[in-house]
Amino acid sequence: MSAMLLSVLSVVVTILVVEGAIGRPRGVPLSRALLYQPGEGNTFKCLNTVQEFPFEYVNDDYCDCDDGSDEPGTAACPNMKFFCQNKGHVAEDILSSRVNDGYCDCCDGSDEYQQEKIQCPNTCDELGRKRREDLVREKELRETGFNIRKQYVEEGLQNLQTNKALVEELEKSKEQMLGERDDLEGKKTEAESPEKEAKEKHEKAWEAVKAERQAARDKLKAAQAFQQLDRNRDTFITVDEMLSQSCFDKNMDGSVTVEEIKEYLEDQEQSTEDEFLEKIWPNIKEIYKPPVEESETKGDEDVSPPSPTDAAAEEKKAEEEDEEKMPDYDEETKRLIEVADEARRLYDEADKKVKDVESQISNAKKYLEKDFGPENEYAFLYNKCFEYTEREYTYKLCPFDKASQRPKSGGSETNLGLWGHWDGASDDKYSAQKYEKGQNCWNGPDRSVKILLQCGIENQLLSASEPSRCEYQFEFATPARCTQPTPEEYQMNYDHDEL
Ligand SMILES: [Ca+2]
Ligand SMILES: [Ca+2]
Ligand SMILES: [Ca+2]
Ligand SMILES: [Ca+2]
């Protein structure tokens, strides 16, 4: 490097150095300013190597240090960082290759200092103002959300205590109700025993009456059959008389044989009436059909109007049915039934009370078993549902219960998953939830949903997607997820000496 060039550069560098309050070469952040002070004999020691150069070599657009540390403000050393001060906005590091590349990268334009290439306007004030506004707004939202969350925590705690107390109280009343039910069960059994006895007695007597009637009817039928079969009225039924009756065709081959008749006739040639009633009738009563008599009433008319005999038959049938109906219980039995009915009613009532209280206990316990977050802040969402509708589907999330989807055009709901567990990363478990074991996908897994939670001042389902087949993802905003904003979080990374 010529002496003259060096001296020119030296002037440039000096101007650059005095530019900042502490003085630092271009592209050096305040935090590193001390490393860029001229050393003994106006030297610069490379930061990460033992090399040492005259201080004029700093930012002379030639890479001298092997670690590139002598060129913080030029593109001479590859893969280095250039520091944009961005006064009024956020300071940032950009790649050294972006220095003087003809594109504005820093909002203060400091990366394009060879102004013959391009003139970069300073937009930091405007960007900074907008960013500050955004941050103020975000901070306000978080604060509002966090205040709502405080109410949730309070409410969650109250609900927790209420439910705990409720379970205790219900368990106590359940004990009492069980006692009452046992008592009433005893009374019921006590009332049912004489009731049962009286009813059985009545029913048995009725069965006997019915059996008697049946026997009488049967006997009458048998006597009629005897008369019908004894065609020559000689008080005997013979094989010949029976042969003419097609109902005795036992093997159904179209002809009635002597053998078939003899089987019915207990191997005899004939039977008297007494014998018929006692032995033969039981053999044939299931198959016997009275011979069709040639009707005398039928005239020449082929089509006869409903004959009076039909109406008579109907009447007779109704009468028979009436006869088949058991008579009412006697007064004493009726009274016993009434007493037992009342005992049953009281028992059923007590039993229902026990079941109701049991279901209340189970609901309260279900609530107590749920993990509603470290401070119960998510308890507020229990028993509520939220929907999000996009082009095709309406998605529904009922926190701690289930997730589903249904076509917008109507149609049945598809279960996407039931409450599973908190699913955030191990250091932030309560940032996500998992709903699983939903309706099975054809040829695939059961549907499931991951819910990503974020801070918002309202509880709202924000989006739904299906990143991989049958595995859905919802974004859900809730105040429960809002943490208190800290000053550090909203401190902008300013280059402090410039403020
Ligand atoms: Ca250099
Ligand atoms: Ca640039
Ligand atoms: Ca005869
Ligand atoms: Ca036959």
Image (tube, rainbow, N blue to C red):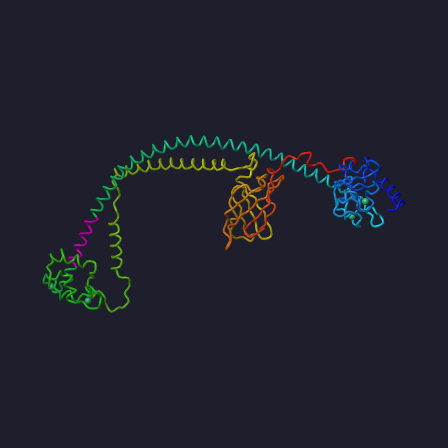
**Closer to us: 230 or 187:** 187
Q: Where 89 falls versus 229 (above or below)?
A: above
Q: Is residue 211 visible?
A: yes
**Closer to us: 209 or 394:** 394
Furthest toward the front, the residue is 50
| Quarter placement of the C terminus | top right
Expressed as whole percent of the image width and height from the top left, the position of residue 46 reads: 77, 41
Q: Is residue 213 rendered to the left or right of residue 362?
A: left
The residue at 84%/47% (across/down) is: 115
Expressed as whole percent of the image width and height from the top left, the position of residue 106 reads: 77, 45
When asked about the image quadrant of residue 349, the answer is: top left
Span shown in magenta = 210-224
Expressed as whole percent of the image width and height from the top left, the position of residue 124 reads: 78, 42
The residue at 26%/53% (across/down) is: 318
Ligand 4's image quarter is bottom left
Q: Is residue 344 rendered to the left or right of residue 145?
A: left
Expressed as whole percent of the image width and height from the top left, the position of residue 453 reads: 59, 42
Q: Is residue 280 rendered to the left or right of residue 426?
A: left
**Closer to us: 288 or 460:** 460
What's the magenta bit mostly, secondary-structure-wise?
helix
Q: Where 101 falls versus 23 (above or below)?
A: below
Q: Is residue 86 visible?
A: no
Q: How many marks?
A: 0
Judge whether residue 222 is colored magenta.
Answer: yes
Furthest toward the right, the residue is 4
**Closer to us: 66 or 323:** 66
The residue at 60%/52% (across/down) is: 391
Judge whether residue 362 is colored magenta.
Answer: no
